[in-house]
Amino acid sequence: MIIAIASGKGGTGKTLVATNLAAVIPEATYADCDAEEPNGHLFLKPQISETKEVYVQVPQIDNTRCTGCGECARHCQFNALAVVKGKVLLFNELCHGCGVCSAVCPEKAITEKPYVLGEVRSGTFSGNKSFVDGSLAIGQLRSAEVIEQVVATVRDSGLVFLDAPPGTSCAAVAAVSKADACLLVTEPTPFGLHDLKLARDTLTKLRIPHAVLLNRADIGDNETGKFCIREGIPVLARIPFDRSIAALYAEGKLIIEQEKWGDVFLNLARKLADINNYSLPDFVKPEEKVLDKVSGSPESAVSVSVLSSFPVLSGKGGTGKTMITACLAAVWGNKVAADADVDAANLGILLSGKVKERIPFSSGLKAEINPELCTGCGKCVKSCHFNAITMNDGKAVVQEMSCEGCGLCKIVCPTVPNAVTLRRPLSGEIKIMQTSCGDVVTAELFPGADASGRLVTEVRKIAERTCSENGTRNILIDGSPGIGCPVNAAITGTRGVLLVVEPSVSSLHDLGRILKLLDFFSLKRWVVINKHDLSAKLTEEIEEFCRNQNVSVLGRIPFDRTITESITRAKIPLADPECAQAGFLQEIAGTVLAEFEKEKT
């Protein structure tokens, strides 16, 4: 039985739950599908026996045959090809490996060659238990292919635990789509409830039974619990807000080393093995809105020039990135805030306000096959590089959540009129909000939709337009976790980046990966250490690592329950009189903004 451990929001404790479950169950298999920031190995300490690279097929141009006609670039839906002075340029990072360019080239000048996206490792832990993880190469954008290889590498065993990436877009779908059931790890906060709803909708669309584990269950309100009762979602376990758990996790230790938690996870495992303990609501397909079939981005998303943008990133989820961004937004006047964590957009919950404008977003095209015109020849099935088309009762059927919208099926379809049409479904929404902290641009990717990087780009463009209208000169960006497509889109054209880290082995590991990405773009960076007193040893290690990397540490924030309590009340901690660290957070925000202004000049 394959069980995915997912979260919607990052930092809810997903990896803590997945690693402890895998450790406590005999003959269990653990597969880390969070390819942008894989952390499971830090806790399970596997012996790696095999490493293999993950490839995607990209075009290879034969310049002796290429005439520069441009057909390949005109048909590429991903802007991965351009023709300059009769020569074809390929942008490997944007290529989806769909095969359209080679299919339409009249001179047959395009073949395919492998291009490395990342790697998959396999081995064992705790004796003979199976371990698999995947890692996206620095500078690459698409983790879904790496995740699919992780899942394909998993061998049969009693229980397989897939540690899924955060969010609800293509990477998360790639991890959970092969699961028999899913455990959603959430917390009783406005952030947790918001993202739980998105994750639930995605799993319902995929027809995957699911249940919930409430982490930090004794803090916040009861709205998340009420939602689970109302929707009939079983809550299989509750873990309290406990500093000792946070300290063990920070040091890379399994909490089942304490006997009471071993019993909790054994009991949880028994429930997980019984499919009757899961919920699967009836799925009613919503009426789908489709944008103009040939239109591109919304006309309102016009890029204009602004002075500077300032992203706040974390690498690992759950370090306090959105909390710090909200504090900066509360004290920075000359800016527009933008939430680029479109898989789990939470900044608007803290910076609440009135919605001034709603802008529809489409991530791209999707194929649709008319069964009355389809002859069942199967050419589209054989040609599709994403296995998104199957045969059903002699007719080709598109699996929408696997379709990349490349259009190859339409090109190879021999029917006249063509049985394949390409439509542009609505896959998200961008909102401009008026708040007490200024204008905020936020967005939400609909459950299961892809191209979150494109949506981040649109959020940036609309934030730039809003700056132009307001006369402001800066954009404050709340970025997403990881190092993939959305993060790359968020840091484009920036002057410097603030990294929020915590003293844990996983956060230190992910700090190293995201610094390599920032090196790739030659960006200035600063660090703030949140919850610094969880581990004095790891805080010192992070500071030493930052010194060696020539990265300034601008402040330390203590582990304080009142900060979390402010967030559970949807309050900005810096502006909440009940938060014991409000004044200290104000000082840190001032220090960070002073450094950013210094860098600008």
Image (spheres, rainbow, N blue to C red):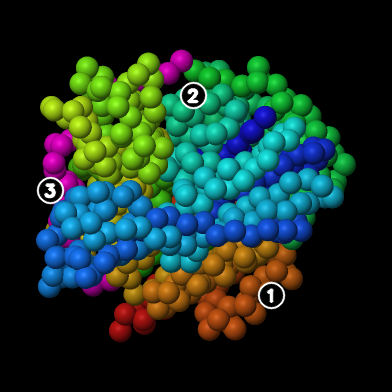
Whichever of labels 2 and 3 marks the residue nearer the N terminus, that label is 2
User: What is the residue that sits farthest to the right in this orientation?
Assistant: 259
Q: In this orientation, does residue 434 appear?
A: no
Instruction: Tell me, yes or no, whether the two marked residues, 1 and 2, touch with CB atoms within 8 Å.
Output: no
Instruction: Tell me, yes or no, whether the two marked residues, 3 and 1, touch with CB atoms within 8 Å.
Output: no
The image quadrant that residue 597 belongs to is bottom left
> Which residue lies under the disc numbered 2?
207
Q: Is residue 238 left or right of residue 138?
A: right
Q: Is residue 521 left or right of residue 454?
A: right
Using the numbered discs, state the Cα–Cα distance from disc 1 to disc 2 in whole angstroms: 46 Å
User: Of helix, strand and loop, which mostly describes the magenta segment?
Assistant: loop
> Which residue lies under the disc numbered 1?
540
Whichever of labels 1 and 2 marks the residue nearer the N terminus, that label is 2
Residue shown at 39% from the left, 28% from the top: 390
Above or below: residue 182 compared with residue 406:
above
What is the magenta range? 282-309
Q: Is residue 248 magenta?
A: no
- Amino acid type assigned to the residue bearing label 1 in the image: Glu
Q: Secondary structure at mark 3?
A: loop
User: Within 10 Å of the Cα at label 2, are there few (<14), some (14-19), or many (20+) other Cα atoms?
Assistant: some
Using the numbered discs, state the Cα–Cα distance from disc 3 to disc 1 in whole angstroms: 50 Å
> Which residue lies under the disc numbered 3?
299
Above or below: residue 185 compared with residue 250:
above
Residue 213 in the image: x percent, y percent?
64, 33
Q: Is residue 7 left or right of residue 140?
A: right
Residue 416 in the image: x percent, y percent?
13, 28
User: Within 10 Å of the Cα at label 1, are there few (<14), some (14-19), or many (20+) other Cα atoms?
Assistant: few
Whichever of labels 3 and 1 marks the residue nearer the N terminus, that label is 3
Q: In this orientation, does residue 278 appear?
A: yes
Residue shown at 43% from the left, 66% from the top: 139
